[in-house]
Image (spheres, grey):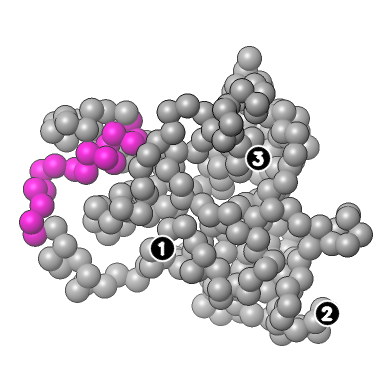
């Protein structure tokens, strides 16, 4: 049975003992990205994060190659988080599934750490899909010290939350996770057009592909994106489709 947003509604118990669908994609995204030239990175849109990654995490469903690690954000200072990311790239932005941890009162989400706290700032952004309110995006700035007199840092966290409508739409029994996008700004104010991909290092790429056939795109990438036969060497037909569909599958941005 399909819901209004196109989700196939079924019981989590039917997915197997490990909570995953059959046909798990055994592809390592780290080794995959290492085979691609500069510009390919894990860069999912807000819509992909709230409509694909977070719902599937809450439902215990298979997401394909693992790209986002499970980390309790509030057990670590923000500068410790990069080393805990599943994708150990040089990009300066990191994604985590964080359990929804409540304070002792059981009503307020925990935002404090041993040496500081995450302070919410700005307005909550409403995330929509097909005119439905599917998620809320909150922004937090990390402060060192004790609230409300902590020292502001440049560490930013974008927190993605499912709405009650989305929870009912997907038949989620336990909304126990949020999805966090963490990065460090270069200054206190917002930077229009700021990019957080890895800085380009010419020496790193100069000789990387010297011994590879430049006419063959990585078969694992083509196979992952559009289910093509990895033995198919007709890369000219597949690569255009993979560039178009890469973001739709796992947020890998070819640009």
Q: What is the span of residues highlighted in magenta in the rendered image?
A: 210-226
Q: Distance from label 2 to label 1 (Cα)? A: 34 Å
The residue tagged 2 is: 148
The residue tagged 1 is: 88
Circle 2 packing at 10 Å, graded few (<14), some (14-19), many (20+), is few
Foreground disc of the pair 2, 3: 3
**Is residue 56 left or right of 142 when viewed as pictured?**
left
Residue 117 counted in the magenta span: no
The residue tagged 3 is: 58
**Is residue 160 left or right of 84 when viewed as pictured?**
right
Name which of mark 1 and mark 3 comes first in the sequence.
Answer: 3
Q: Secondary structure at mark 3?
A: helix
Are the residues at dot 2 and dot 1 in contact (C-beta closer than 8 Å)? Answer: no
Circle 1 packing at 10 Å, graded few (<14), some (14-19), many (20+), is few
Count of numbered marks: 3
**Residue 203: % across, % down:** 19, 74
Q: Distance from label 1 to label 3 (Cα)? A: 24 Å
Q: Residue 253: in sight, yes or no?
A: no
**Is residue 166 left or right of 67 when viewed as pictured?**
right
Of 164 and 100, the residue lying toward us: 100
The residue at the point 76 percent across, 57 percent down is: 101
Occupied quadrant, residue 232:
top left
Of 152 and 107, the residue lying toward us: 107
Q: Secondary structure at mark 1?
A: loop
């Amino acid at each position: 049975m399909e819901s209004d947003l196109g989700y196939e509604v079924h019981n989590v118990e039917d997915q197997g003992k490990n909570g995953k669908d059959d046909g798990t994609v055994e592809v390592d995204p780290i080794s995959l990205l290492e085979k691609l030239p500069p510009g390919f990175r894990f860069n999912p849109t807000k819509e992909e994060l709230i409509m694909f990654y977070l719902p599937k995490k809450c439902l215990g469903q298979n997401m394909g190659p693992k790209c986002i690690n499970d980390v309790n954000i509030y057990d670590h200072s923000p500068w410790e988080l990069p080393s805990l990311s599943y994708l150990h790239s040089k990009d300066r932005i990191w994604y985590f599934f964080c359990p929804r941890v409540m304070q002792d009162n059981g009503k307020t989400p925990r935002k404090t750490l041993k040496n500081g706290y995450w302070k919410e700032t700005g307005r909550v952004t409403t995330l929509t899909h097909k005119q439905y309110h599917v998620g809320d995006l909150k922004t937090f700035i990390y402060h060192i010290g004790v609230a409300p007199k902590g020292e502001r840092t440049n560490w930013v966290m974008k927190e993605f939350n499912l709405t009650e409508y989305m929870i009912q739409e997907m038949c989620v029994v336990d909304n126990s996770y949020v999805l966090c996008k963490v990065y460090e700004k270069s200054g206190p104010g917002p930077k229009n057009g700021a990019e957080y991909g890895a800085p380009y290092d010419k020496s790193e790429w100069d000789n990387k592909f010297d011994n590879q056939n430049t006419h063959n795109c990585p078969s694992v990438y083509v196979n992952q994106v559009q289910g093509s036969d990895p033995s198919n060497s007709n890369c000219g037909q597949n690569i255009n489709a993979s560039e178009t569909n890469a973001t739709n599958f796992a947020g890998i941005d070819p640009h």
